[in-house]
Amino acid sequence: EVQLVESGGGLVQPGRSLRLSCKTSGFTFGDYGLSWFRQAPGKGLEWLTFIRSEAYGGTTEYAASVKGRFTISRDDSEGIAYLQMNTLKPEDTAVYYCARVRCTSCSGLYDIWGQGTMVTVSS
Amino acid sequence: DIQMTQSPSSLSASVGDRVTITCQASQDIRIYLNWYQQKPGKAPKLLIYDASKLEIGVPKRFSGSRSGTDFTITISSLQPEDVATYYCQQYNSFPFTFGQGTKLEI
């Protein structure tokens, strides 16, 4: 079964850092790109970042709201993607989802999502 | 950035009704538009991709269409399990952007 499982969320003070993990299984992780999204309480979905597979250079894209503060990375040997979040702000409070693209050459079409992990930024 | 304007923001309908939700892109996104369904406390689920292609396993009562920069998702006969919030998402160019969502109730 293809599966994504996020972890690493929790309560963190403003200005601090947190690293989220997205553990994958059931497919060859290295063949696929992956994104992180978030959803603030009661709000809509926001795309945050994308990392291509190594076959497509492993390059990354970011939303302006997180560029320079958040970093996406991947460990193909472990099948894990990460989201390093620095200088967190209260407005970063949200459920964070990782999602896999639908095909190896896709970049914006997401068919498999994790269950989400909650991040609360508060003093 | 490409703005996606989704309407209505909420909608109440009856079982068996035909329901249509619209999304308008601020510029040409070709066919690169997805529709997702999200139920409370759950992750989004892909329903339609490339404006009109039905994802595997999605009931045939769901359909999508495009007219220029206007996109619609239609539920031909609303079922109780369709209660959810629906989002459009463009992936013509980065940053990928979502519509504001449509909360569908029965």
Image (spheres, coloured by chain):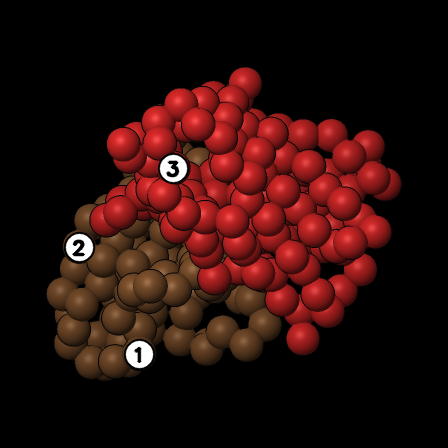
Chain colours: A red, B brown
Quick one: A98 or B24, which is closer to the camera? A98
* Residue B69 rendering spot, x and y as whole percentages: 42, 37
Which tag is nearer the camera, tag 3 or tag 1? 3
Gap in angstroms between the C-alphas marked 3 and 1: 36 Å
Quadrant location of the C terminus of chain A? top left
Quick one: A105 or A94, which is closer to the camera? A94
Residue A9 visible in image: yes
Gap in angstroms between the C-alphas marked 2 and 1: 16 Å
Q: Characterize the local packing of mark 2: few (<14), some (14-19) or many (20 or more) Cα atoms within 10 angstroms.
A: few
Quadrant location of the N terminus of chain A? bottom right
Quick one: A55 or A20, which is closer to the camera? A20
Q: Secondary structure at mark 2?
A: strand
Left/right placement of residue A44 relative to residue A34 reads: left
Q: Characterize the local packing of mark 1: few (<14), some (14-19) or many (20 or more) Cα atoms within 10 angstroms.
A: few
Amino acid at the residue labelled 3? Val
Which tag is nearer the camera, tag 2 or tag 3? 3
Q: Chain of mark 3?
A: A
Amino acid at the residue labelled 2? Ser
Residue beneath the point at 46% across and 77% down: B59
Residue located beneath label 3 in the image:
A12
Residue located beneath label 1 in the image:
B81
Residue beneath the point at 72% across and 42% down: A74
Residue located beneath label 2 in the image:
B10
Residue beneath the point at 45% across and 48% down: A9
Q: Chain of mark 1?
A: B
Amino acid at the residue labelled 1? Glu
Give residue A103's quadrant in the image: bottom right
